Amino acid sequence: MLYDILIIGGGIAGMTSALYAKRNNKNVLIIEKEAFGGQIASSPKVENFPTIQSISGLELSDRIFTQITEYGVDFELDTVVSLKKENDIFTVITVYGEYQSKTVVIASGVEHKTLRIPGEEDLVGKGISYCAVCDGPFYKGEEVVLVGDGNTALQYALLLSEYCSKVKVCTLFDRFFGDESHVTALMKKDNVEVIQNVATVAFEKDNSGLTGVVFENRIDKSRFTIATKALFVAIGQIPDNDIYSSLADLDKYGYILSDENCTTKTEGLFVAGDCRVKAVRQLTTAAADGAVAALNACNYILKHVDLWK
Ligand SMILES: Cc1cc2nc3c(=O)[nH]c(=O)nc-3n(C[C@H](O)[C@H](O)[C@H](O)COP(=O)(O)OP(=O)(O)OC[C@H]3O[C@@H](n4cnc5c(N)ncnc54)[C@H](O)[C@@H]3O)c2cc1C
């Protein structure tokens, strides 16, 4: 089957793209490698999505997913591993198959950064987590450590402070880099301790998993260990766009270069959401990109209708 529009990534950008494409009567496939909703599915609370005062990220994702499936969007749970264009047709290769489409929208978002400390990977699921919404409840009543200083770290710390006995928030510098409202809310919490100017340097563990985190004070270079069974890491995100680099230009950080029209250097290939170079990475901007990319893909199909006869 030749799809009109194939969308890589089922986050907010990808699902909004699908919504606009389907309402323009196109046959649409979304391929998502993990869970529909993308990053926002791991957010405890969203309070800046117009018309909704407060909603969990998971519920917001579910609502959009329901909306697009009711329109009849096809979807596959699979990982895209490569993309090529030959004779005006894109071939998207996944772990389990191969799909063809007249146009493609890359909406692959970003992934969480890791600390890149030896042993980290082995401790994921055994004490180290990148998602407080998903794993926080396992540590009710316990003391936990969180590393990070941006909005995600602040939101996670606030959430954990609701049910953990103590949250030690460790920051690399002497300040937070997130919204002032989150910082103010966190400072009011009795069970939150902020430890500044520290770098995570090592982990301690036993047979059951993490037992402690070793930090180094950046100023005086002294080292200390915080005993804990749970470390939440929220230190930012990175894109994963190398597989598209023959068809789309990337900047030095790996984000896809584009413009207001969400086009790339390849005709028929569009990009939407956090995976592209942009100033503001938020739900509203991801949704806006999704709409722009889909409508421009529809226009491209209309203009080049003879190509696929
Ligand atoms: C904890 C947290 C809280 C946040 N809170 C807010 C908030 O309150 N308000 C706000 O506006 N924004 C918030 N954000 C930011 C917001 O979530 C993002 O800007 C937005 O979700 C980006 O959507 P996206 O679709 O571009 O990317 P993503 O959400 O990253 O979705 C990309 C999707 O593509 C999939 N994918 C990637 N590569 C492949 C592949 N090769 N094959 C198949 N699928 C692939 C991924 O699995 C993912 O599901 C928050 C982010 C986090 C992490």
Image: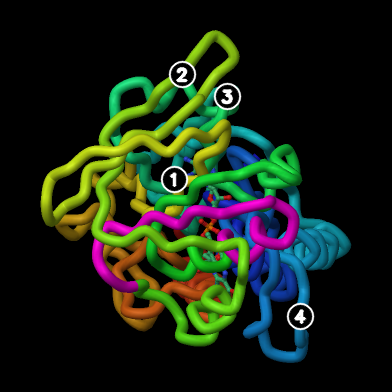
Span shown in magenta: 156-175
Q: In 3D space, how far apart are the residues under numbered discs 2 and 1 (Cα atoms)?
A: 48 Å
Circle 3/circle 1 CB separation < 8 Å: no
Q: In 3D space, how far apart are the residues under numbered discs 3 and 4 (Cα atoms)?
A: 32 Å
Ligand 1 appears in which quadrant?
Answer: bottom right
Q: Nearer the viewer, mark 3 or mark 4?
A: 3
| 177 shown above or below 224 | below
Q: Quadrant of the C terminus?
A: bottom right
Residue at screen point 39% across, 40% down: 83
Of residue 90 and residue 252, the one placed in the foreground of this image is 252
| 213 shown above or below 306 | above
Q: Position of residue 219 (x, y in %)?
A: 12, 56
Q: In 3D space, how far apart are the residues under numbered discs 4 and 2 (Cα atoms)?
A: 39 Å
Label 2: state its secondary structure.
strand
Q: Nearer the viewer, mark 2 or mark 3?
A: 2
Of residue 195 and residue 263, the one placed in the foreground of this image is 195
Pointer 1: what residue? 90
Label 2 amino acid? Answer: Lys
Of residue 261 and residue 177, the one placed in the foreground of this image is 177
Residue at screen point 67% across, 56% down: 41
Crowd class of label 3 (few under 14; some 14 to 19; many from 20; radius 10 Å): some
Circle 2/circle 3 CB separation < 8 Å: yes
Pointer 2: what residue? 205
Q: Nearer the viewer, mark 3 or mark 1?
A: 3
Residue at screen point 25% across, 47% down: 199
Label 1 amino acid? Answer: Phe
Q: Position of residue 230 (x, y in %)?
A: 56, 37
| 234 shown above or below 84 | below
